[in-house]
Image: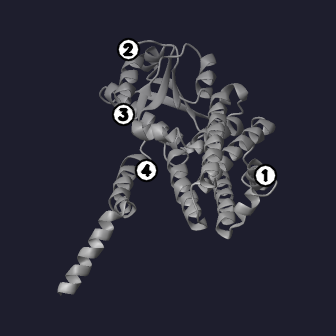
Amino acid sequence: MKQLGTFIKKEFRHVFRDKKTLLLLFGLPVVQIVLFGFALTNEIKDSKLVIVDYARDAATQEIIERFRASAHFDLEESLLSHLEIESAFKKGKVKMVLVFPVNFEKDLVHQGRADLQLIADASDPNTATSLVNFAQAIISDFQQTRATGSYGVQIVLETRNIYNPELKGTTNFVPGVLALVLLLICVLMTSVSIVKEKENGTMEILLVSPFSPYMVILAKVVPYLLLSIVNLIFILALSVFLLDMPINGSLWLLISVSIIFIITALSLGLLISSVTDSQQTAMLISLMGMLLPTMMFTGFLFPLENMPMPLQVIANFIPSKWYYIIVKDVMIKGLGVAAIWKETLVLIVMTFFLLALSIKKFKIRLA
């Protein structure tokens, strides 16, 4: 028993000396609890709602206040006309618009019914459906409070889903999967291919050859760049012809921005390869380090606006988040360069930063 106790003490000392093991034992559960508790939620709250009020009477103000009191909506400044609605949706920050017609309260009082229009951004069909249901519940509650005796009032709710009238799930699924697949393939293949040269001892031979180190890196990257472009075209073809999802914007703009994203992912793969010495480590970092953040912080599985602010800040450092926004704007909404130049600029800055850092780390480790 004394020997057993000695060995147990020895193992405890090994565990407490190994910082990586301690981080795995205590850090991983904390991270998982935080993410599952705050990030991985489909709850809809604080969604941007814009009001177009042509009536400006007591009834419309009462309904507006009910929406303002709801945790599901965050009221934006009122629009003046229908002409501004499309512009509001193109900015990507408005989820739904509520339109009150002229003489709304008069129609309720004299005719017992009035019309009301809801316009929802259905590029994310799940969110649009939930918001419409929440709005219908608020309107129904208002109708009940306005009912007098056996006489009720009826609000005819006209719902219009823009960008995705049929509420197809592919409009949210395809851009997310496109970002996920391209990022994983590019990062994984690039990092593993360079680390494989290190393990086989051929990297040193390449570096002492007449070729420049930059040529070695470029030769490793170009094949995966071309293969990724072919993969991109294949995915887009499947989306259009198999999933019946049209490309409403410019195809060449979509491909051009996708190439920028592919280069960003390849740069990230170079960085991983420069700080790892084994294929297993590179593969683990590429898969686990890219898969979970892409799924959680891109926005196609879990709404980013519902996450706590620190997690929303972290999401800004995930390249796939910006690419996902671009694909939805170009492919679904049919927007052009003017709508996506900020997101594209973020990807370009990320690419230059990752390239510079990976080249610097590559030189230091093989010097």
Above/below status of 123 relative to 338? below
- Residue at 64% x, 68% y: name it: 199
Q: Determine the image quadrant of residue 353.
A: top right
Above/below status of 81 relative to 120? above
Kind of residue indicated by mark 2: Ala
Q: Residue furthest left?
A: 2
Q: Secondary structure at mark 1?
A: helix
Kind of residue indicated by mark 4: Leu
Q: Nearer the viewer, residue 223 or 207?
A: 207
Q: Determine the image quadrant of residue 108.
A: top left
First in sequence: mark 1 or mark 4? Answer: 4
Q: Secondary structure at mark 4?
A: loop
Tell me, yes or no, if residue 179 can be seen here: no
First in sequence: mark 2 or mark 1? Answer: 2
Residue under label 4:
40
How far apart are labels 2 and 3 at the CA level? 22 Å
First in sequence: mark 4 or mark 2? Answer: 4
How far apart are labels 4 and 3 at the CA level? 18 Å
Q: Secondary structure at mark 3?
A: loop
**Residue 58: which numbered mark, if any?**
2
Q: Badges 4 and 3: C-beta atoms under 8 Å apart?
A: no
Q: Badges 2 and 3: C-beta atoms under 8 Å apart?
A: no
Above/below status of 336 relative to 123? above
How far apart are labels 1 and 4 at the CA level? 36 Å
How far apart are labels 3 and 1 at the CA level? 50 Å
- Residue at 40% x, 50% y: name it: 35
